[in-house]
Image: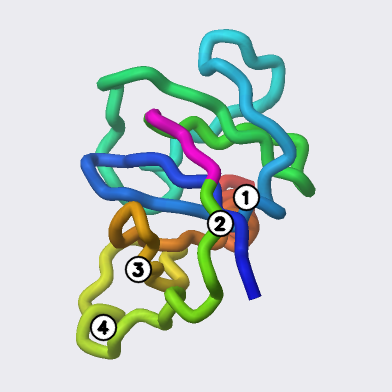
């Protein structure tokens, strides 16, 4: 089974989400939807460096602001693995669900729907 991933960076880390969670992408300065920087969702300090893009969440009508480059790649499901127990026990980034050993290199896979739900609960 192949899975499409949208990849991006945050604080030098390569991250991705399932493409099914994203309905589009906007330039960061051309948005008209509520925006949340990815760094705030996963527990990293804000990053104003580099070109920023907004990934539109398919179900929420909101944007997640990420650093580029933003890419789309398809990976075989066999290269996606749960976090090893030692890594999972020490993981400080919120929302990390798996590790993919993609052809372009390792990438941490996030669940944006779960992250945004937790963000909404904390800020309501």
The residue at the point 52 percent across, 63 percent down is: 75
In this view, the residue in front, 70 or 83, is 70
Mark 2 falls on what kind of element?
strand
| Residue plotted at (59% across, 34% down) | 55
Which labelled disc corresponds to residue 21? Answer: none
Q: Which mark is residue 120?
A: 1
Q: CA distance from mark 1 to mark 2?
A: 30 Å
Determine if the magenta segment contains residue 71. Answer: yes
Q: Please state the horizontal and vertical placement of residue 74, each as a whole percent of the image.
A: 56, 56
Residue nearer the viewer, 99 or 120: 99
- The secondary structure making up most of the magenta span is strand
Q: Nearer the viewer, mark 1 or mark 2?
A: 2
User: Quadrant location of the N terminus?
Assistant: bottom right
- Of tags 3 and 4, the one toward the viewer is 3
Position of residue 72 relative to residue 34, above or below, is below
Q: Is residue 87 above or below residue 73?
A: below
Secondary structure under tag 1 reads: helix
User: Crowdedness of circle 2 by 10 Å Cα count: few (<14), some, many (20+)?
Assistant: some
CB under 8 Å between callouts 4 and 2?
no
Disc 3 is placed on an element classified as strand
Residue 89, labelled with which disc? 4
Lower sequence index among marks 1 and 3: 3
* Residue indicated by mark 2: 74
Q: Nearer the viewer, mark 4 or mark 2?
A: 2
First of labels 4, 1 by sequence position: 4
Q: Count the numbered circles shown.
A: 4
Instruction: Please give the range of residues in magenta.
Output: 68-72
Report how far apart the C-alphas of labels 3 and 4 lie in the structure: 20 Å
Mark 4 or 1: in front is: 4
């Amino acid at each position: 089974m192949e899975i499409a991933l949208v990849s991006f960076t945050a604080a030098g880390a390569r991250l991705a989400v399932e493409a099914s969670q994203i309905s589009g992408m906007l330039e960061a300065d051309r948005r008209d939807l509520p925006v949340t920087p990815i760094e705030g969702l996963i527990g990293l300090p804000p990053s104003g460096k580099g070109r920023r893009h907004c990934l539109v969440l398919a179900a929420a009508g909101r944007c997640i602001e990420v650093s580029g480059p933003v890419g789309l790649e398809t990976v075989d499901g066999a290269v996606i693995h749960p976090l090893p127990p030692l890594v999972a026990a020490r993981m400080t980034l919120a929302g990390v669900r798996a590790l993919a050993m993609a052809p372009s290199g390792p990438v941490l896979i996030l669940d944006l729907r779960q992250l945004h739900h937790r963000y909404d609960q904390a800020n309501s």
